[in-house]
Amino acid sequence: MVGAEDVNSVIQESKSQERARVAEIDGLAIDCMARNGFDYAGPKRESETIEVAPGLEGEERIAAVGSGVVATELWMLDHGSELLGAADGVPPDAQQELEFPEDVTFRETLRETVNVDGEVINGGCTRWADDEYLRLHPERLTRIELSDAYGSYMQVAFEDIRMNRVNDAWSACMAAEGFTGYHKIGDQFDDLLRRIAEIQGREHGPNVVRAELEELMSYDIAVSTAAYTCWGQVESDRQELLDEYATTFADTHRDEIALLKGDG
């Protein structure tokens, strides 16, 4: 019998799988452009990895940067311009097109309309490459459809009255730790994002923004530490409920899961 772990193993794409998929799609787009007379090198996908707490995990990471969302904003203040590349603040993926600013046909062929084997493709070689990849790898479409179905199905689990009890227990624990107003697991992330948006929305210089973000990161560490503690009190009950739903889903979709696992 298939179970929850089987669902997760087939719908979650590994980093190596993602890299291979993106590389193949880029190659298809390059071939498409070549057939239409254009020397296209593909998008420049190199980017700097954002690492706000290198080498730290679990409680040590939380003690250093909390959830990491505020620390990431601080990182961006120092390194954000590096992610934009050298083309006057234009993201690296867009630079390839800027190398041909005078060639309207190039841009149209890449992004708008292209004729492939007598068929007009709206979306250009980029869209054709995406569609061609799905034709060559129908399991990718199965994975996407299964993932969407799983997300919709599992939403019911979060509406289950037993999940409400889990959230109530977590919320009560957070209040006891001194953090009120958080009613379900994850509310602290939404609150942090809201506070970040408020800071960035005010008309202050970068030094003031940095000071406010640094103050918010202290709060992030405190609330994330409490959330981690309270999570430990409800994690097993929450996971048991999610596994129950996931197992039912997996049993219903056993054929698709077997196909993606290569068992059928």
Image (spheres, rainbow, N blue to C red):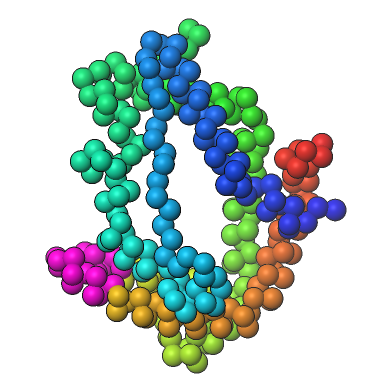
Residue 3, by quadrant, is bottom right
| Residue at the spot 31% in from the left edge and 66% down from the top edge | 74
Residue toward you, 25 or 113: 25
- Main SS type for the magenta part? helix
In the image, is 252 to the left or to the right of 38? right
From the viewer's perspective, is residue 246 above or below residue 108?
below
In the image, is 23 to the left or to the right of 101? right
From the viewer's perspective, is residue 23 above or below residue 7?
above
Q: How far across and down, in percent of the image, does residue 136 sit? A: 62, 25
| Residue 202 shown in magenta | yes
Q: Residue furthest top?
A: 118
Does residue 129 appear anywhere in the picture?
A: no
Residue toward you, 88 or 133: 88
Residue toward you, 222 or 82: 82
| Residue 111 shown in magenta | no
Q: How many marks?
A: 0
Q: How far across and down, in percent of the image, does residue 95 sit? A: 30, 33
| Residue at the spot 57% in from the left edge and 47% down from the top edge | 15
Q: How far across and down, in percent of the image, does residue 162 sit? A: 65, 75
Q: How far across and down, in percent of the image, does residue 144 sit? A: 60, 41
Residue 207, by quadrant, is bottom left
In the image, is 28 to the left or to the right of 101? right
Q: Residue furthest right?
A: 1
| Residue at the spot 18% in from the left edge and 65% down from the top edge | 206
Image quadrant containing the C terminus? top right
| Residue at the spot 61% in from the left edge and 41% down from the top edge | 17
Query: What segment carries the magenta color?
Result: 196-213
Does residue 14 appear anywhere in the picture?
A: yes
